[in-house]
Amino acid sequence: MKRFCSIPLLALALGGAAPVPKQEPAPAPSEIVAAAPATDWVAIAAADLMVMDLAPDTRGKPRRVVIQLMPAPFSQGWVGNIRKLVAARWYDGVSVNRVQDNYVVQWGDVSEKKPLPEGLANLTDTGFAAIRSVTDVHLTNGGSVRDVEPNVSWVRGEYLNYRAIRDRKGGAEGYPHGTGYVEGWPVAGDVDDNGYEQLAIWPTHRHAMVGVGRNMPPDTGTGAELYTVIGHAPRHLDRNIALVGRVIEGIEHLSSLPRGTGPLGFYESAEERVPILSVRMGNEVAGLPAYQYLSTESESFALYADARANRRDAFFIRPAGGADICNIPVPVRRVPAP
Amino acid sequence: MKRFCSIPLLALALGGAAPVPKQEPAPAPSEIVAAAPATDWVAIAAADLMVMDLAPDTRGKPRRVVIQLMPAPFSQGWVGNIRKLVAARWYDGVSVNRVQDNYVVQWGDVSEKKPLPEGLANLTDTGFAAIRSVTDVHLTNGGSVRDVEPNVSWVRGEYLNYRAIRDRKGGAEGYPHGTGYVEGWPVAGDVDDNGYEQLAIWPTHRHAMVGVGRNMPPDTGTGAELYTVIGHAPRHLDRNIALVGRVIEGIEHLSSLPRGTGPLGFYESAEERVPILSVRMGNEVAGLPAYQYLSTESESFALYADARANRRDAFFIRPAGGADICNIPVPVRRVPAP
């Protein structure tokens, strides 16, 4: 199996002995991540994980999907509802009902008649942008605003850490907003370039992000109906639907499901739907591995982001000189054995 | 099935009677496409289609994938090789060997021993950017460079039609290059804003684009090993791998395959590989539907692109105010019955 289309994470493993192109190969993003010191990794609390076990596949293989819920200040109303739904075992026995190619996989109660537990918050769309007009974000000079290669810069503020990957002249990825990371999560925001005195930041859609299905506005959904992105980032959904988390393991059990043939990719028959056996919080699941993410404030992440934007490892001929935020996923791993 | 995460193409169908948000709902992108006059649709020649029939699925359902090959001036060396490989029936009996989540599906000869037909061109990477430093691209004023909403503009030149979706201040999508469309194909390019005297344009990776697998440079591949994108657009591959076409029908037969568990998503056992029964050019296949794409130079496409970037239909609360090129796919359809 010699000919292949290179993959960031493993290309080097297969290509070590290959002819060297014009410029000297540099570490691949995966090598930078592998070399990151233990102190650059941040533990993900088991209590912030949601473990969804689907019915086994046709060969009897288990299908487990692990979802990390978003931390404050983002979407906490919906996250709170989801915690209540898990506590009430509400998701046990619902199903995956929709798989639309290059878009989303969605799960919930297809009958729409399963009673919701009491005490769910009634939410409005003001929660979509979790941080609005934050003032008094003071910058510390020398190291807090930096440029790495042409278009990676970040801001460290008093109230939040916001690392921005932006177009050199403003805006990013065809959208009028900047994009970046807050404590491991991809976000977009309106940033005032003249002093960063105003920041409004919201979570952004990318592959494997989990959001809250809803009906037409002003409905914003409860959290009982969830979806995850399996295709190109549908950024037009940002601030239109609440994002609540991301799949950190097992996305392939959702993304490889047969596509639904009904409108919007809904399955048309009961046999096609995939039963959800149970959903539990991570601290309720015996033997669950511990997970970590690479701190988006770490030097390792800055190097990794730069390498993703400027591929110089052996497979590449011309570095792109930039990257959209969805092509710089935040590395997540199982905690390695000591 | 009330609660859902809206889909551009069908949201309006389900949402007609929903409460109206603050601003008046506008036509959805799908409605603009449906209303496009017949003259805005361009025929795709059957001779430019490659019809790949996979072995039927486990229920005996046929799996046909229809690929449109790229026109001149793009990648014609590889396209020529692919035509020869089809004529020699070389692809008949090879298989899908790799499925990597959020990345690519790849097919070819897993043994790497199947002899190639004679007469294939030996290609170099200079073909990745098909148009380099085109001079004398004269603009006709008044209508040739326009701005539609904040960030949609296009250029019509003497030698090519290049419609650019760009960030307002230059660059696009986090990358230092502009992006746009040439005769129905998504491209990126270096554009000299001061008179457009220099243009270098290359096809860009997005969902369903088909490219040529290769080994380490200076190898560029022959066209015998192909892949298609099933996840977020891997734009870092632009100008590093030759793009030769796009899947216009049947992508779900590839994107929903089980993910490979070997390195780079390669299947580890022969049973997992999906046999390719035959690959034929469209004009060799009896009863193949006729296909069309929406002209990217049409007014309908401009309206559609604007609507994708500024969703104002009923589901949306806040239009994004922009879009990356991969979120503005070129509409392709079967020619409707008269």
Image: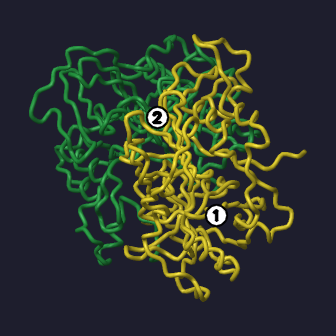
Chain colours: A green, B yellow
What percent of the width, then of the height, locates residue B249? Answer: 70, 54
Residue to which mark 2 is pinned: A205
Q: Nearer the viewer, mark 2 or mark 1?
A: 1
What amino acid is labelled 1 in the image? Answer: Leu
Quadrant position of residue A170? top left
Mark 2 element type: loop
User: Would residue B90 appear left or right of A334 to someone viewing this image?
Assistant: right
Q: Residue at x 64, y 20 (%)?
A: B314
What amino acid is labelled 2 in the image? Answer: His
**Residue A230 in sight:** no
**In the figure, A299 relative to A30: above or below?**
above
Numbered marks: total: 2
Q: Nearer the viewer, residue A146 or B44?
A: B44
Quadrant position of residue A46? top left
Are there few (<14), some (14-19), or many (20+) residues within 10 Å of tag 2? many
**Residue A37 in sight:** yes
Mark 1 element type: strand
Q: Which quadrant does the C terminus of chain A fall into?
A: bottom left
Residue to which mark 1 is pinned: B69
Label 2 and label 1 in one chain:
no
**In the figure, B62 relative to A284: above or below?**
below
Q: Measure the alpha-carbon separation of dots 2 and 1.
A: 31 Å
Are there few (<14), some (14-19), or many (20+) residues within 10 Å of tag 1? many
Q: Nearer the viewer, residue A228 or B225?
A: B225
Q: Residue at x 60, y 64 (%)?
A: B72
Q: Nearer the viewer, residue A10 or B115?
A: B115
